[in-house]
Image: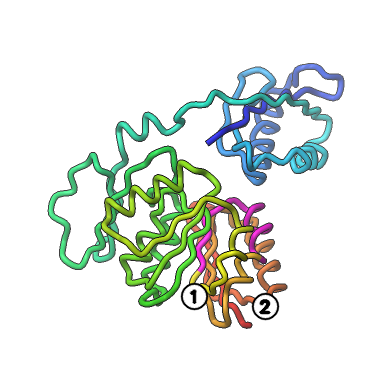
Amino acid sequence: MKYLKVIFNLTDSDKNTISDKLMAQASKDVLCDNLADIGFEAFENDEKEGVTGYVQQNVFDENLLEGCICDFPIGNVMISYTVQEAEDKNWNEAWEETGFEPIVVKGKFIIHDIIHDTGKIPDGTLDITIDTKQAFGTGGHETTFMIVNELFMTGIHDKCVLDCGCGTGILSIVASKLGAAEVTAYDIDEWSVENTRHNCELNKVDNIYVVKGDASLLQSLKKRFDIVLANINRNILLNDISSFKSVMGKGAILILSGFYQSDAHLLIDCAETLNMRLIGQRVENDWCMLKFEALS
């Protein structure tokens, strides 16, 4: 996946270095929080006046960035920036080499990589193998973990499932192993599409259809889904939720995560305008998951 490197310079109203160290750090923290809301994924903190943010090229929206800076809540702080193409490399390389510790919920599932030895898997426990290849989603992050848990409490058997922004394919694979009739998964990133297909093979599931693209492809599918899953950032969810609803029939379930609890009201309000009602909510470390039912 291609990334942009955006270098931010924070100064006072006279374009000098912010002298108050606490104010300077608070300004950087607030900026990073706001940038995360518009799709930035990682940050490097300059001890002086700067901070560097990384965002996928296809996610970057300069209008949103300008709005973020114009609405900056700390007065007398000036923010300038430059945009560069980031080095094209495998950002997950170290993680892929070392793997991740198995994630276990007793009596439900174990999610593990191909490196760590899990020993004998207890009977009745869902065994999910995830090999990370430049894609995100192992179950370790709160958002993925919450959706995986929610799938165990949602009637999946014989349902038609849609996984939006599939990453490693973990949600698709869980749905398949819980008895979904079929799963359609898509992602804008080719690495994620290939990684999902690879993980489907590892887990011996053959009812998952994986395609490269964004929510605009849904209209071409010409089918209705019983359960729609989306673990993406807030702004993409707000932009795509009407597309999700367009492929849901009455009574279909929409499960969303990838955003902070403070942003939940935006998605709830948006879903209500589309005639969906909130039927579940969960929060882990300020990350939020929402579950809706389509009323029409």
Residue 165 is labelled as: none
Residue 226 is labelled as: 1
**Residue 154 in the image, given as x and y percentages of width and height:** 41, 74
Q: In which quarter of the image is residue 72?
A: top right
| Amino acid type indicated by mark 1 | Asp
Main SS category, magenta section: helix
Residue 237 covered by magenta stretch: yes
Q: Are marks 2 and 1 in contact (CB under 8 Å)?
A: no
Residue 36 covered by magenta stretch: no
Give the vertical position of 110 relative to 115 (above or below).
below
Disc nearer the start of the sequence (2/1): 1
**Residue 36 in the image, given as x and y percentages of width and height:** 62, 42
What residue is rendered at 54% in x and 69% in y?
254
> Between 126 and 35, which is closer to the camera in this rendering?
126
What residue is rendered at 20% in x and 68% in y?
124
Give the vertical position of 228 relative to 88 (above or below).
below
- The residue labelled by disc 2 is 275
**Residue 219 in the image, given as x and y percentages of width and height:** 62, 65
Magenta stretch bounds: 228-242
**Residue 136 in the image, given as x and y percentages of width and height:** 45, 44
Q: In what element is the residue under mark 2?
A: loop
Q: Measure the alpha-carbon separation of dots 2 and 1.
A: 16 Å
> Between 227 and 145, which is closer to the camera in this rendering?
227
| Amino acid type indicated by mark 2 | Asn
What residue is rendered at 41% in x and 53% in y?
169
> Between 135 and 280, which is closer to the camera in this rendering?
135
Give the vertical position of 62 relative to 279 (above or below).
above
Q: Of discs 2 and 1, which sits in the foreground?
A: 1
What residue is rendered at 68% in x and 57% in y?
239
The answer to whether 122 appears left or right of 34 in the picture is left
